[in-house]
Structure formats: C-alpha cells, structure tokens
Image (cartoon, rainbow, N blue to C red):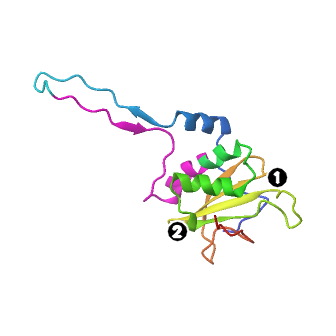
Amino acid sequence: MRRSASAPLRLVVPSALVAAALLLAGCTPTPEPTPSASSPSATPTPSPTPTGPVFVPEGSAAQNLPIFAAVVNQIAATDARFQGRAYIDALVAVGFPKSEMEVTNDLTTVGNPADSIQFSVRWAGECLVGQVGPSTPAPTAVVLPLLPGGTCLVGQTRLIDW
C-alpha cells in the first residue's frame, strides 16, 4: 500500500463532538437495585461504567483508533494544535508508550511553521497515524500498515527526548 500526500485516508470526528464526549467522559454509577425479600441485607455497590472511547492495552490498532482520534481532535481544538509534542504527551497520558511513537518537525528547515505535522504509534503490528496542520483540512487519524523498515512515518522525524 502506497501512501500519497494527495489522497490521505481520514477518520474525521467533528471537534465539537469529541470535546463534548471528552467533557462527558468519566464514570456513571450503575443504579442500585432494590433489595429483594430473599436478601434483605444485600446492598450492591454501584460500579463505574466508562463512557466514550477508551484505551485498550491488549487491543488492536483498529480497537484503539477511537481513543487515538479523540486525542487528536482534542489537541487540534487547542492553541497547541500545531505542536507535535502536545500530541505525543496526550497520547502517553491515555496509555500509549512513548517508545513506540514518531513525530515530524513542527518547523521547516528555515524556521517557519510546518504546513502539516504527522505523529504515529506503532501498535500491534500496525500504525496509528495522525496528521494536522494548516494544509490539512481537518485532523486526520487512520490505521496504516507498518513500513518495511518497521517505522510508521516516511521521511525525517524528530527525536522524542522529553
């Protein structure tokens, strides 16, 4: 499968929808059933039920795409939207290992902001890849195959040393 800058694959989730989902994400208690006559002293404890996308540590790249996309959209809606480090830090915060990540430079070789930045996570033999930037119509999050060299991004990436 060849990647073409002119024909990227996209999973686009409206930023407002993701922001709302992330704001509402959390724990919702399970309602307590009323004790039955056969067990009058049984009082079940409510258990939290997660809402929204969640990180699946043993899951596939496709199973983790919803949380990856949610993070991409969440950061893209902030002032840090063109800073690769913000995406890496947010992906680490939800559970992805930094050692499996790649990110392109935020700036061009002459110090101007990059037209787009890409970042990725090697996961379960595949790649979760995100792209954002002024030349990208909307934040993009996709699952792609690993490249032959075992990396996810084509071209020069920056060292993730923080």
Tell me whether the residue at label 1 lies in contact with that at label 2, contact meaning CB atoms closer than 8 angstroms: no
Compared to 75, does 121 lie above or below? below
Q: Position of residue 92 (x, y in %)?
A: 56, 56
Q: Nearer the viewer, residue 114 or 1?
A: 114
Q: Position of residue 69 (x, y in %)?
A: 61, 49
Which residue is painted at 71% across and 42% down in the image? Answer: 78
Magenta stretch encompasses residue 63: yes
Question: Which residue type carries mark 2?
Answer: Gly
Which residue is painted at 86% across and 67% down in the image? Answer: 109
Q: Using the image, tell me which numbered label, if any, was put on residue 125.
A: 2
Residue 25 as seen in the image, left or right of residue 86: left
Q: Position of residue 56 (x, y in %)?
A: 45, 54
Q: Using the image, tell me which numbered label, if any, was put on residue 135.
A: 1
Mark earlier in primary sequence (1, 2):
2
Q: Nearer the viewer, residue 48 or 67?
A: 48
Q: Categorize mark 2 by other alpha carbons within 10 Å: few (<14), some (14-19), many (20+).
A: few
Magenta stretch encompasses residue 98: no
Quadrant in which residue 157 is drawn: bottom right
Which stretch is magenta? 42-70
Question: Which residue type carries mark 1?
Answer: Ser
Q: Report if residue 118 is visible in the image.
A: yes
Quadrant in which residue 89 is drawn: bottom right
